[in-house]
Image (cartoon, rainbow, N blue to C red):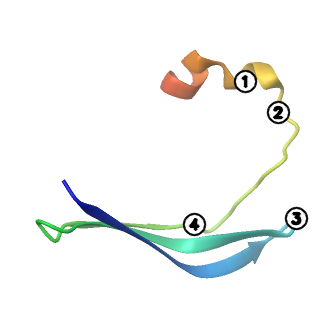
Amino acid sequence: MVKRLENTKPVTFPGGNLRNSNILMTDVRTGHATSMVIKAFRANEGLPDSTFTVRELQWGL
């Protein structure tokens, strides 16, 4: 399985966070592609470390 990841259109979001707003993942064999457009981005929200347990990272809330 070979996939290609493309990140384009860098945007500076509130708080000075620079991120690519368009993300495209393409399966090179089949040509199938999935596109994601990021419209909002937040970082450094003051979440406690206990939010990031292995279980929470695997399963979510």
Q: Earlier in the sequence, mark 3 or mark 1?
A: 3
Q: Farthest front residue?
A: 2
Question: Which image quadrant: the C terminus?
Answer: top right
Q: Which residue is mark 3?
A: 15
Q: Is residue 49 above or below residue 30?
A: above
Q: How far is mark 4 from mark 1, CA to CA?
A: 23 Å
Q: Is residue 31 above or below residue 2?
A: below
Which quadrant of the structure image shows residue 45?
Answer: top right
Q: Farthest bottom residue?
A: 9
- Hey, what amino acid is under mark 4? Ile
What residue lies at 18% left-to-right and 53% top-to-bottom? 1
Q: Which residue is mark 4?
A: 38
Q: Is residue 41 above or below residue 51?
A: below
Do residues under tags 3 and 1 come within 8 Å of each other at their CB atoms?
A: no
Left or right: where does residue 38 sit relative to residue 53? Answer: left
Residue 32: where, in percent of width, then height? 19, 67
Q: Which residue is mark 2?
A: 47
Q: Earlier in the sequence, mark 2 or mark 4?
A: 4
- Hey, what amino acid is under mark 1? Thr
Q: Earlier in the sequence, mark 4 or mark 1?
A: 4
Residue 16: where, in percent of width, then height? 86, 69
Secondary structure of the residue carrying tag 4 is loop
Q: How far is mark 3 from mark 2, CA to CA?
A: 16 Å
Q: Residue 51 — which label?
A: 1
Q: Could you classify mark 1 by the number of other residues whose Cα lies within 10 Å: few (under 14), some (14-19), or many (20 or more)?
A: few
Residue 27: where, in percent of width, then height? 22, 64
